[in-house]
Image (cartoon, grey):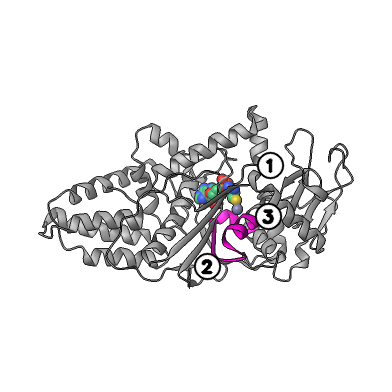
Amino acid sequence: MQTWPAPHVPELPGHGPEVRVVDTTSGELVVAAPGAVAELYVCGITPYDATHLGHAATYVAFDLLHRAWLDAGKEVHYASNVTDVDDPLLERATATGVDWEKLAEEQTALFAEDMTALGVLPPTTYLGAVETIPTIADAVQRLLDQGLAYRVPIEEGAGGDRPDLGDVYADVQADPHFGSVAGLGHDETVALFAERGGDPRRPGKRDPLDPALWRRERPGEPAWEAGELGTGRPGWHIECTVIAQDALGSEFDVQGGGRDLCFPHHEMSTAHARALGGEGARAHMHAGMVAYDGAKMSKSLGNLVLVSRLREHGVDPMAVRLAILAHHYREDWEWTDEALRRAAARLERWRSALSGNGGPDATSTIEAIRTAMAEDLDAPAALRAVDTWADAALSVGGDDIGAPGLVARALDALLGVRV
Ligand code: 5CA
Ligand code: ZN
Protein backbone atom coordinates (compact mmCIF):
# COMPACT_ATOMS: atom_id res chain seq x y z
CA MET A 1 0.00 0.00 0.00
CA GLN A 2 1.41 3.39 -0.93
CA THR A 3 1.64 6.03 1.77
CA TRP A 4 1.33 9.74 1.28
CA PRO A 5 4.36 12.09 1.08
CA ALA A 6 6.08 12.84 4.38
CA PRO A 7 5.96 16.52 5.34
CA HIS A 8 9.21 18.12 6.43
CA VAL A 9 9.63 18.26 10.22
CA PRO A 10 11.77 21.25 11.21
CA GLU A 11 14.60 20.85 13.72
CA LEU A 12 14.32 22.65 17.04
CA PRO A 13 17.13 23.50 19.44
CA GLY A 14 17.63 20.75 22.03
CA HIS A 15 15.18 17.95 22.74
CA GLY A 16 11.79 17.59 24.38
CA PRO A 17 11.28 15.49 27.54
CA GLU A 18 10.40 11.77 27.67
CA VAL A 19 6.80 11.34 26.51
CA ARG A 20 4.28 9.93 28.98
CA VAL A 21 0.76 8.91 28.02
CA VAL A 22 -2.27 7.40 29.71
CA ASP A 23 -2.39 3.66 29.09
CA THR A 24 -6.03 2.61 28.71
CA THR A 25 -5.52 -0.65 30.59
CA SER A 26 -4.12 0.81 33.80
CA GLY A 27 -5.49 4.33 33.44
CA GLU A 28 -2.02 5.45 34.56
CA LEU A 29 0.55 7.70 32.96
CA VAL A 30 3.34 5.53 31.57
CA VAL A 31 6.48 6.25 29.56
CA ALA A 32 5.18 5.63 26.06
CA ALA A 33 8.43 4.27 24.61
CA PRO A 34 11.31 3.65 27.01
CA GLY A 35 13.89 2.83 24.29
CA ALA A 36 15.67 4.87 21.63
CA VAL A 37 13.35 3.42 18.99
CA ALA A 38 9.63 4.02 19.49
CA GLU A 39 7.24 1.51 17.93
CA LEU A 40 3.70 2.54 17.16
CA TYR A 41 0.83 0.72 15.51
CA VAL A 42 -2.27 2.77 14.73
CA CYS A 43 -5.29 0.98 13.34
CA GLY A 44 -6.01 2.31 9.87
CA ILE A 45 -9.27 2.99 8.10
CA THR A 46 -11.82 0.69 6.60
CA PRO A 47 -11.99 2.53 3.30
CA TYR A 48 -15.50 3.83 2.87
CA ASP A 49 -16.94 7.16 4.10
CA ALA A 50 -13.40 8.41 4.69
CA THR A 51 -12.18 10.72 6.05
CA HIS A 52 -14.66 12.06 8.55
CA LEU A 53 -13.67 14.35 11.40
CA GLY A 54 -13.66 11.45 13.88
CA HIS A 55 -11.08 9.61 11.80
CA ALA A 56 -9.11 12.82 11.33
CA ALA A 57 -9.06 13.55 15.09
CA THR A 58 -7.80 10.06 15.88
CA TYR A 59 -4.96 10.18 13.31
CA VAL A 60 -3.99 13.71 14.37
CA ALA A 61 -3.82 12.47 18.00
CA PHE A 62 -1.28 9.77 17.12
CA ASP A 63 0.56 12.20 14.87
CA LEU A 64 1.15 14.29 18.00
CA LEU A 65 2.68 11.28 19.70
CA HIS A 66 4.87 10.64 16.64
CA ARG A 67 6.06 14.27 16.66
CA ALA A 68 6.68 14.33 20.43
CA TRP A 69 8.81 11.19 20.11
CA LEU A 70 10.82 12.69 17.24
CA ASP A 71 11.35 15.81 19.33
CA ALA A 72 12.55 13.64 22.22
CA GLY A 73 15.25 12.35 19.85
CA LYS A 74 13.72 8.95 19.13
CA GLU A 75 13.61 7.03 15.91
CA VAL A 76 9.96 6.17 15.24
CA HIS A 77 8.77 2.97 13.61
CA TYR A 78 5.16 3.57 12.74
CA ALA A 79 2.96 0.90 11.17
CA SER A 80 -0.63 1.06 10.06
CA ASN A 81 -3.08 -0.90 7.96
CA VAL A 82 -5.98 -0.45 5.60
CA THR A 83 -8.85 -2.88 6.17
CA ASP A 84 -9.45 -3.19 2.46
CA VAL A 85 -11.61 -6.28 2.70
CA ASP A 86 -14.16 -6.74 5.49
CA ASP A 87 -17.93 -7.15 6.00
CA PRO A 88 -18.88 -3.44 6.30
CA LEU A 89 -16.90 -2.49 3.17
CA LEU A 90 -18.46 -5.33 1.16
CA GLU A 91 -21.93 -4.48 2.48
CA ARG A 92 -21.51 -0.84 1.46
CA ALA A 93 -20.27 -1.81 -2.01
CA THR A 94 -23.26 -4.13 -2.50
CA ALA A 95 -25.74 -1.57 -1.16
CA THR A 96 -24.48 1.15 -3.50
CA GLY A 97 -23.84 -1.13 -6.48
CA VAL A 98 -20.15 -0.31 -6.77
CA ASP A 99 -17.22 -2.67 -7.10
CA TRP A 100 -15.72 -3.24 -3.63
CA GLU A 101 -12.14 -2.96 -4.87
CA LYS A 102 -12.85 0.31 -6.62
CA LEU A 103 -14.57 1.68 -3.50
CA ALA A 104 -11.59 0.70 -1.34
CA GLU A 105 -9.08 2.14 -3.79
CA GLU A 106 -10.86 5.47 -4.16
CA GLN A 107 -11.41 5.90 -0.45
CA THR A 108 -7.84 4.94 0.41
CA ALA A 109 -6.62 7.58 -2.06
CA LEU A 110 -8.97 10.18 -0.59
CA PHE A 111 -7.72 9.35 2.91
CA ALA A 112 -4.12 9.87 1.75
CA GLU A 113 -5.05 13.28 0.31
CA ASP A 114 -6.77 14.27 3.54
CA MET A 115 -3.85 13.13 5.70
CA THR A 116 -1.48 15.10 3.46
CA ALA A 117 -3.62 18.21 3.78
CA LEU A 118 -3.79 17.81 7.57
CA GLY A 119 -0.01 17.43 7.82
CA VAL A 120 -0.10 13.92 9.31
CA LEU A 121 3.24 12.08 9.10
CA PRO A 122 2.82 8.85 7.12
CA PRO A 123 3.46 5.39 8.57
CA THR A 124 6.77 3.73 7.74
CA THR A 125 4.97 0.43 7.10
CA TYR A 126 1.55 0.64 5.52
CA LEU A 127 -0.18 -2.57 4.53
CA GLY A 128 -3.59 -3.52 3.26
CA ALA A 129 -5.39 -6.63 4.48
CA VAL A 130 -5.58 -8.02 0.93
CA GLU A 131 -1.84 -7.84 0.26
CA THR A 132 -1.18 -9.49 3.63
CA ILE A 133 -3.47 -12.49 3.16
CA PRO A 134 -0.71 -15.13 2.78
CA THR A 135 0.95 -14.05 6.06
CA ILE A 136 -2.38 -13.87 7.87
CA ALA A 137 -3.38 -17.31 6.57
CA ASP A 138 -0.08 -18.75 7.87
CA ALA A 139 -0.78 -17.29 11.31
CA VAL A 140 -4.33 -18.70 11.35
CA GLN A 141 -3.01 -22.12 10.32
CA ARG A 142 -0.49 -22.01 13.18
CA LEU A 143 -3.25 -21.22 15.69
CA LEU A 144 -5.29 -24.15 14.36
CA ASP A 145 -2.28 -26.46 14.59
CA GLN A 146 -1.68 -25.40 18.19
CA GLY A 147 -5.28 -26.01 19.19
CA LEU A 148 -5.86 -22.32 19.95
CA ALA A 149 -8.39 -22.07 17.11
CA TYR A 150 -11.09 -24.37 15.78
CA ARG A 151 -13.35 -24.81 12.79
CA VAL A 152 -17.07 -24.03 12.78
CA PRO A 153 -19.23 -25.75 10.14
CA ILE A 154 -20.61 -23.50 7.42
CA GLU A 155 -24.06 -23.29 5.86
CA GLU A 156 -25.00 -25.05 2.68
CA GLY A 157 -23.75 -23.35 -0.46
CA ALA A 158 -20.69 -21.88 1.28
CA GLY A 159 -17.11 -23.03 0.95
CA GLY A 160 -16.80 -23.51 -2.82
CA ASP A 161 -15.50 -26.98 -3.64
CA ARG A 162 -14.40 -27.63 -0.03
CA PRO A 163 -17.58 -27.08 1.99
CA ASP A 164 -16.24 -29.53 4.58
CA LEU A 165 -13.65 -26.98 5.75
CA GLY A 166 -15.41 -24.60 8.11
CA ASP A 167 -14.79 -21.01 9.16
CA VAL A 168 -11.99 -20.67 11.74
CA TYR A 169 -12.52 -19.04 15.14
CA ALA A 170 -10.10 -18.23 17.95
CA ASP A 171 -10.75 -19.87 21.31
CA VAL A 172 -10.77 -16.99 23.82
CA GLN A 173 -11.07 -19.39 26.77
CA ALA A 174 -7.67 -20.84 25.91
CA ASP A 175 -6.10 -17.51 26.88
CA PRO A 176 -5.79 -16.93 30.66
CA HIS A 177 -5.06 -13.25 30.04
CA PHE A 178 -8.10 -12.57 27.86
CA GLY A 179 -9.66 -9.29 29.01
CA SER A 180 -6.34 -7.70 29.89
CA VAL A 181 -6.79 -4.67 27.62
CA ALA A 182 -10.31 -3.41 28.25
CA GLY A 183 -10.84 -5.06 31.65
CA LEU A 184 -14.58 -5.56 31.07
CA GLY A 185 -16.89 -8.26 32.45
CA HIS A 186 -18.11 -11.11 30.25
CA ASP A 187 -21.77 -10.02 29.81
CA GLU A 188 -20.84 -6.41 29.08
CA THR A 189 -18.39 -7.60 26.45
CA VAL A 190 -20.92 -9.85 24.70
CA ALA A 191 -23.21 -6.84 24.12
CA LEU A 192 -20.33 -4.70 22.84
CA PHE A 193 -19.09 -7.54 20.66
CA ALA A 194 -22.48 -7.75 18.91
CA GLU A 195 -22.58 -3.98 18.49
CA ARG A 196 -19.07 -3.76 17.04
CA GLY A 197 -18.94 -6.33 14.28
CA GLY A 198 -18.89 -9.57 16.32
CA ASP A 199 -21.24 -12.56 15.98
CA PRO A 200 -21.95 -13.80 19.53
CA ARG A 201 -24.91 -15.89 18.42
CA ARG A 202 -23.20 -17.81 15.65
CA PRO A 203 -24.05 -21.50 16.24
CA GLY A 204 -21.15 -23.86 16.77
CA LYS A 205 -18.86 -21.45 18.61
CA ARG A 206 -17.35 -22.46 21.93
CA ASP A 207 -17.76 -19.02 23.48
CA PRO A 208 -20.01 -16.20 22.19
CA LEU A 209 -16.93 -13.94 22.22
CA ASP A 210 -14.77 -16.13 19.99
CA PRO A 211 -13.82 -13.97 16.98
CA ALA A 212 -13.51 -15.13 13.38
CA LEU A 213 -9.97 -15.68 12.12
CA TRP A 214 -10.80 -16.99 8.68
CA ARG A 215 -14.13 -16.73 6.85
CA ARG A 216 -14.63 -19.33 4.15
CA GLU A 217 -15.73 -18.46 0.67
CA ARG A 218 -19.38 -17.38 0.30
CA PRO A 219 -21.30 -16.87 -2.94
CA GLY A 220 -20.79 -13.30 -4.15
CA GLU A 221 -17.94 -12.57 -1.72
CA PRO A 222 -14.26 -12.29 -2.66
CA ALA A 223 -12.09 -15.20 -1.52
CA TRP A 224 -8.44 -16.19 -1.73
CA GLU A 225 -6.67 -19.55 -1.85
CA ALA A 226 -5.13 -20.45 1.50
CA GLY A 227 -3.99 -24.08 1.46
CA GLU A 228 -5.51 -26.18 4.21
CA LEU A 229 -7.68 -23.34 5.46
CA GLY A 230 -9.67 -23.42 2.25
CA THR A 231 -10.59 -20.44 0.11
CA GLY A 232 -11.74 -17.44 2.11
CA ARG A 233 -10.74 -14.14 3.66
CA PRO A 234 -9.22 -13.05 6.96
CA GLY A 235 -11.03 -11.89 10.07
CA TRP A 236 -10.51 -8.31 11.21
CA HIS A 237 -8.56 -8.61 14.47
CA ILE A 238 -5.94 -11.05 13.20
CA GLU A 239 -5.23 -8.63 10.35
CA CYS A 240 -3.86 -6.02 12.77
CA THR A 241 -2.04 -8.60 14.89
CA VAL A 242 -0.15 -9.92 11.91
CA ILE A 243 0.62 -6.57 10.30
CA ALA A 244 1.83 -5.13 13.61
CA GLN A 245 3.93 -8.19 14.37
CA ASP A 246 5.50 -8.24 10.92
CA ALA A 247 6.36 -4.56 11.00
CA LEU A 248 7.28 -4.05 14.65
CA GLY A 249 8.01 -7.47 16.12
CA SER A 250 6.10 -9.55 18.62
CA GLU A 251 6.28 -6.80 21.26
CA PHE A 252 6.02 -3.11 20.58
CA ASP A 253 5.35 0.10 22.46
CA VAL A 254 1.89 1.41 21.64
CA GLN A 255 -1.22 0.29 19.81
CA GLY A 256 -3.74 3.02 19.22
CA GLY A 257 -7.06 3.93 17.75
CA GLY A 258 -10.35 5.53 18.66
CA ARG A 259 -11.98 4.40 21.90
CA ASP A 260 -14.50 2.26 20.00
CA LEU A 261 -11.59 -0.05 19.12
CA CYS A 262 -10.65 -0.82 22.73
CA PHE A 263 -13.14 -3.67 22.81
CA PRO A 264 -13.32 -5.94 20.95
CA HIS A 265 -10.65 -5.03 18.42
CA HIS A 266 -7.63 -4.34 20.63
CA GLU A 267 -8.61 -6.96 23.16
CA MET A 268 -8.82 -9.57 20.40
CA SER A 269 -5.74 -8.50 18.44
CA THR A 270 -3.69 -8.57 21.65
CA ALA A 271 -5.08 -12.02 22.53
CA HIS A 272 -4.10 -13.22 19.04
CA ALA A 273 -0.60 -11.76 19.51
CA ARG A 274 -0.23 -13.76 22.75
CA ALA A 275 -1.54 -16.90 21.08
CA LEU A 276 1.14 -16.45 18.40
CA GLY A 277 3.81 -16.34 21.11
CA GLY A 278 4.32 -12.60 21.51
CA GLU A 279 2.96 -9.88 23.75
CA GLY A 280 1.55 -7.33 21.33
CA ALA A 281 1.46 -3.73 22.49
CA ARG A 282 2.90 -2.79 25.90
CA ALA A 283 0.46 0.14 26.13
CA HIS A 284 -2.85 0.95 24.49
CA MET A 285 -4.02 4.45 23.79
CA HIS A 286 -7.50 5.48 22.78
CA ALA A 287 -8.75 8.75 21.38
CA GLY A 288 -12.14 10.14 22.41
CA MET A 289 -15.13 10.03 20.10
CA VAL A 290 -16.05 13.02 17.97
CA ALA A 291 -19.78 13.62 17.72
CA TYR A 292 -21.88 15.59 15.29
CA ASP A 293 -25.53 16.57 15.59
CA GLY A 294 -25.67 15.06 19.07
CA ALA A 295 -24.38 11.56 18.24
CA LYS A 296 -21.03 9.85 17.65
CA MET A 297 -19.94 10.62 14.10
CA SER A 298 -20.25 7.26 12.39
CA LYS A 299 -20.64 5.67 9.02
CA SER A 300 -23.67 3.75 10.20
CA LEU A 301 -25.55 6.88 11.37
CA GLY A 302 -24.38 8.93 8.40
CA ASN A 303 -23.83 12.10 10.51
CA LEU A 304 -20.52 12.78 8.84
CA VAL A 305 -18.43 15.87 8.27
CA LEU A 306 -15.83 14.90 5.68
CA VAL A 307 -12.41 16.55 5.59
CA SER A 308 -12.53 16.47 1.78
CA ARG A 309 -15.90 18.28 1.77
CA LEU A 310 -14.47 21.04 4.00
CA ARG A 311 -11.44 21.29 1.70
CA GLU A 312 -13.73 21.58 -1.32
CA HIS A 313 -15.45 24.47 0.41
CA GLY A 314 -12.13 26.25 0.75
CA VAL A 315 -11.60 25.62 4.47
CA ASP A 316 -7.90 25.83 5.38
CA PRO A 317 -6.88 22.31 6.53
CA MET A 318 -4.70 23.92 9.20
CA ALA A 319 -7.86 25.45 10.70
CA VAL A 320 -9.37 21.94 10.76
CA ARG A 321 -6.24 20.67 12.48
CA LEU A 322 -6.37 23.50 15.03
CA ALA A 323 -10.06 22.82 15.72
CA ILE A 324 -9.08 19.22 16.53
CA LEU A 325 -6.11 20.29 18.68
CA ALA A 326 -8.34 22.53 20.79
CA HIS A 327 -9.61 19.30 22.43
CA HIS A 328 -7.52 16.90 24.47
CA TYR A 329 -7.25 13.66 22.48
CA ARG A 330 -8.93 11.57 25.19
CA GLU A 331 -11.93 13.88 25.40
CA ASP A 332 -15.25 13.16 23.66
CA TRP A 333 -16.33 16.31 21.86
CA GLU A 334 -18.73 17.61 19.28
CA TRP A 335 -17.74 19.09 15.93
CA THR A 336 -19.53 22.38 15.28
CA ASP A 337 -19.21 25.19 12.75
CA GLU A 338 -18.42 27.40 15.72
CA ALA A 339 -15.42 25.21 16.69
CA LEU A 340 -14.10 25.61 13.15
CA ARG A 341 -14.74 29.35 13.15
CA ARG A 342 -12.84 29.77 16.43
CA ALA A 343 -9.93 27.74 15.08
CA ALA A 344 -9.77 29.82 11.89
CA ALA A 345 -9.73 33.02 13.97
CA ARG A 346 -6.94 31.63 16.16
CA LEU A 347 -4.88 30.70 13.10
CA GLU A 348 -5.38 34.16 11.65
CA ARG A 349 -4.23 35.76 14.91
CA TRP A 350 -1.16 33.53 15.10
CA ARG A 351 -0.32 34.34 11.49
CA SER A 352 -0.36 38.05 12.13
CA ALA A 353 1.68 37.66 15.36
CA LEU A 354 4.25 35.58 13.45
CA SER A 355 4.50 37.99 10.55
CA GLY A 356 6.25 40.69 12.61
CA ASN A 357 9.96 41.45 12.32
CA GLY A 358 10.55 40.31 15.83
CA GLY A 359 8.69 39.26 18.92
CA PRO A 360 8.97 38.39 22.60
CA ASP A 361 11.56 35.78 23.55
CA ALA A 362 10.17 32.35 22.64
CA THR A 363 12.25 30.11 24.90
CA SER A 364 9.61 29.67 27.60
CA THR A 365 6.89 29.22 24.97
CA ILE A 366 8.77 26.37 23.29
CA GLU A 367 9.39 24.81 26.69
CA ALA A 368 5.69 25.10 27.61
CA ILE A 369 4.63 23.44 24.34
CA ARG A 370 7.13 20.62 24.85
CA THR A 371 6.11 20.07 28.47
CA ALA A 372 2.41 20.02 27.55
CA MET A 373 2.90 17.54 24.72
CA ALA A 374 5.14 15.23 26.75
CA GLU A 375 2.45 15.02 29.44
CA ASP A 376 -0.17 12.90 27.66
CA LEU A 377 -0.25 15.09 24.54
CA ASP A 378 -1.99 18.06 26.11
CA ALA A 379 -2.55 20.01 22.89
CA PRO A 380 -5.04 22.50 24.41
CA ALA A 381 -2.35 23.57 26.92
CA ALA A 382 0.16 23.91 24.08
CA LEU A 383 -2.26 26.12 22.14
CA ARG A 384 -2.73 28.32 25.20
CA ALA A 385 1.04 28.78 25.43
CA VAL A 386 1.12 29.90 21.80
CA ASP A 387 -1.84 32.23 22.42
CA THR A 388 0.09 33.84 25.28
CA TRP A 389 3.10 34.44 23.05
CA ALA A 390 0.88 35.76 20.20
CA ASP A 391 -0.96 38.10 22.60
CA ALA A 392 2.33 39.53 23.80
CA ALA A 393 3.68 39.85 20.25
CA LEU A 394 0.57 41.70 19.11
CA SER A 395 0.20 43.95 22.15
CA VAL A 396 3.69 44.81 23.38
CA GLY A 397 5.75 43.40 20.51
CA GLY A 398 9.36 42.45 21.20
CA ASP A 399 12.76 42.76 19.60
CA ASP A 400 13.88 39.15 19.44
CA ILE A 401 14.41 38.82 15.69
CA GLY A 402 14.55 35.02 15.79
CA ALA A 403 11.43 34.53 17.93
CA PRO A 404 8.67 34.39 15.27
CA GLY A 405 10.69 31.90 13.21
CA LEU A 406 11.34 29.74 16.24
CA VAL A 407 7.66 29.71 17.26
CA ALA A 408 6.64 28.89 13.68
CA ARG A 409 9.11 25.99 13.56
CA ALA A 410 7.87 24.68 16.91
CA LEU A 411 4.25 24.86 15.74
CA ASP A 412 5.17 22.91 12.66
CA ALA A 413 7.43 20.32 14.33
CA LEU A 414 5.43 19.66 17.49
CA LEU A 415 1.84 20.41 16.56
CA GLY A 416 1.94 19.88 12.80
CA VAL A 417 0.48 23.34 12.28
CA ARG A 418 1.98 25.20 9.33
CA VAL A 419 1.33 28.92 9.58
N1 5CA B 1 -10.05 -0.50 10.00
C1 5CA B 1 -10.49 -0.47 11.35
C2 5CA B 1 -9.34 -0.47 12.32
S1 5CA B 1 -8.22 -1.77 12.02
C3 5CA B 1 -11.39 0.72 11.65
O1 5CA B 1 -11.87 0.81 12.74
N2 5CA B 1 -11.58 1.56 10.64
S2 5CA B 1 -12.55 2.85 10.74
O2 5CA B 1 -12.46 3.47 9.45
O3 5CA B 1 -13.84 2.45 11.16
O4 5CA B 1 -11.97 3.79 11.81
C4 5CA B 1 -10.68 4.34 11.68
C5 5CA B 1 -10.24 4.98 12.99
O5 5CA B 1 -11.09 6.11 13.26
C6 5CA B 1 -10.39 4.05 14.20
O6 5CA B 1 -9.28 4.27 15.07
C7 5CA B 1 -11.65 4.52 14.87
O7 5CA B 1 -11.65 4.28 16.26
C8 5CA B 1 -11.60 6.01 14.58
N3 5CA B 1 -12.94 6.64 14.64
C9 5CA B 1 -14.06 6.26 13.99
N4 5CA B 1 -15.11 7.07 14.31
C10 5CA B 1 -14.62 8.00 15.18
C11 5CA B 1 -15.17 9.13 15.87
N5 5CA B 1 -16.44 9.48 15.73
N6 5CA B 1 -14.36 9.86 16.67
C12 5CA B 1 -13.04 9.54 16.82
N7 5CA B 1 -12.46 8.49 16.19
C13 5CA B 1 -13.22 7.73 15.37
ZN1 ZN C 1 -6.91 -2.53 13.70
Q: Are marks 1 and 2 in contact (CB under 8 Å)?
A: no
Q: Which mark is residue 408?
A: none
Q: Is residue 4 above or below residue 177?
A: above
Nearer mark to the viewer, of 1 and 3: 3
Residue bounds of the magenta highlight: 241-263
Q: Residues within 10 Å of mark 1 (few under 14, many from 20)?
A: few
Residue 193 image-quadrant placement: bottom right
Instruction: Please state if 158 lies on the left or on the right of 304 as rendered.
Output: right
User: What's the amino acid at mark 2?
Assistant: Asp
Residue 87 numbered mark, or none:
1
- Residue 238 shows which numbered tag? 3
Is disc 1 placed on a helix, strand or loop? helix
Reply yes or no: does residue 249 show up in magenta. yes
Q: Residues within 10 Å of mark 2 (few under 14, many from 20)?
A: many
Instruction: Measure the C-alpha gap from mark 3 to mark 2.
Output: 22 Å
- Amino acid type of the residue that numbered disc 3 sits on in the rendered structure: Ile
Disc 3 vs disc 2: which is toward the camera? 3
- Horizontally, residue 192 falls left or right of residue 214, namely left
- Decide if ligand 1 comes within 8 Å of the CB at mark 2: no
Residue corresponding to mark 2: 23
The vertical placement of 16 against 313, above or below, is below
Q: Position of residue 87 (x, y in %)?
A: 68, 42
Amino acid type shown at disc 1:
Asp
